[in-house]
Amino acid sequence: MSATAAPLDPLAPAADAEAEARHSNTFLRLKKKLERSVGEAIGDYGMIGDGDTVMVCISGGKDSYTLLSCLLALRERAPVDFRIVAMNLDQKQPGFPDDVLPGYFESIGVEYRIVTEDTYSIVKDKIPEGKTTCSLCSRLRRGIIYRTAKEIGATRIALGHHRDDILETLFLNMFFGGKIKAMPPKLVSDDGNHVVIRPLAYCTEADITRFARAMDFPIIPCNLCGSQENAQRKQIKAMLQGWARDFPGRIESLATSLKNVVPSHLADSRLFDFAGLTQQTRVEEGDTAFDPIDLPPLPTAQTIQFPSPVRTDA
Ligand code: SF4
């Protein structure tokens, strides 16, 4: 399969219109909103400090371009001084346009590192045809990313996962893994050597898509490896998009709930000492044994309609 950098979608506006769009008030508001959300996430989770070197992983997709753009903009006005190095791993997938990212990085004047490792052949060699290749592929990629971070002295590795990726992961883990677990905005690698951050944790995919389209980033297709998007993740995405359409505010509430976990009102005795609970224990969030849960009223459009009573005297 051959591929060159393609626009985000075939219906995207032409280049002139995009350039014009970049000066519109709507675009400037969107840019400000994304940068504010990234700044908030960085502040809330202490993602970046003075003297950090942040290696920003760039795949060539809309999310990682947006991440890099926001971080560069924020660095201009941040009260702390930090270094940004854009990093791309060329996995030698067929048709990967290896001139696109170096050209882009040079055009915006950011320091960068391209790492070329043929993980594609390794994965094809090791995994039988028809089996899913993503888990070996990501394991190999993770090892290379960590090694590169060490080589360039990165103290932070920034990934482009956004709010909707995080919520999809939450539901994937609940539906198929029996766990309440999402993607953390900040984590330390298993070997304790790397801190991984997700500065887009508060940004919605819809905003990122609009921003990437207006910026006319040279998007590289994400299906070069020939692997299909995980079918279960696709279903969850569709479920969340349906909720966003039918129940305004639900997705925002879900995202907020990740920041308001009440272990005493779940059932994990590793997080809360249920066995040791006595009359003397003080419990966060109070007693809800008998109280109704305090929920906001349904919006008028969703008020449940009860059927009219059936007449029996006819
Ligand atoms: S989709 Fe392709 S590139 Fe991405 S993890 Fe799976 S095999 Fe690797």
Image (tube, rainbow, N blue to C red):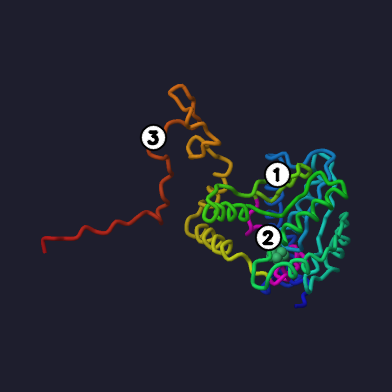
Residue 94 magenta-highlighted: no
* Residue designated by label 1: 187
Q: Position of residue 100 (x, y in %)?
A: 83, 67
262 left or right of 220 in image: left
Q: Nearer the viewer, mark 1 or mark 2?
A: 2
Mark 3 residue type: Ala
Q: Earlier in the sequence, mark 1 or mark 2?
A: 2
Tag 1 near tag 2, CB within 8 Å: no
The answer for how far apart the CA atoms under marks 1 and 2 are is 19 Å
The quadrant in which residue 41 appears is top right
Image: magenta residue range: 203-226
Q: Position of residue 67 (x, y in %)?
A: 74, 54
Q: Position of residue 297 (x, y in %)?
A: 41, 46
Mark 1 residue type: Leu
Residue drawn at (56%, 53%) of the image: 173
* Residue designated by label 3: 289
Q: Is residue 212 visible?
A: no
Residue drawn at (65%, 52%) of the image: 203
Quarter of the rendered image showing ligand 1 = bottom right
* Residue designated by label 2: 135
Viewer-proximal residue among 215 and 111:
111
Tally of numbered tags: 3
Instruction: Please tell me how crowded label 1 is: few (under 14), some (14-19), or many (20+) other residues with Cα within 10 Å.
Output: some
Residue 211 magenta-highlighted: yes
The quadrant in which residue 211 appears is bottom right
The quadrant in which residue 86 appears is bottom right
Residue drawn at (54%, 56%) of the image: 176
Q: Nearer the viewer, mark 3 or mark 2?
A: 2
Instruction: Please tell me how crowded label 2 is: few (under 14), some (14-19), or many (20+) other residues with Cα within 10 Å.
Output: few
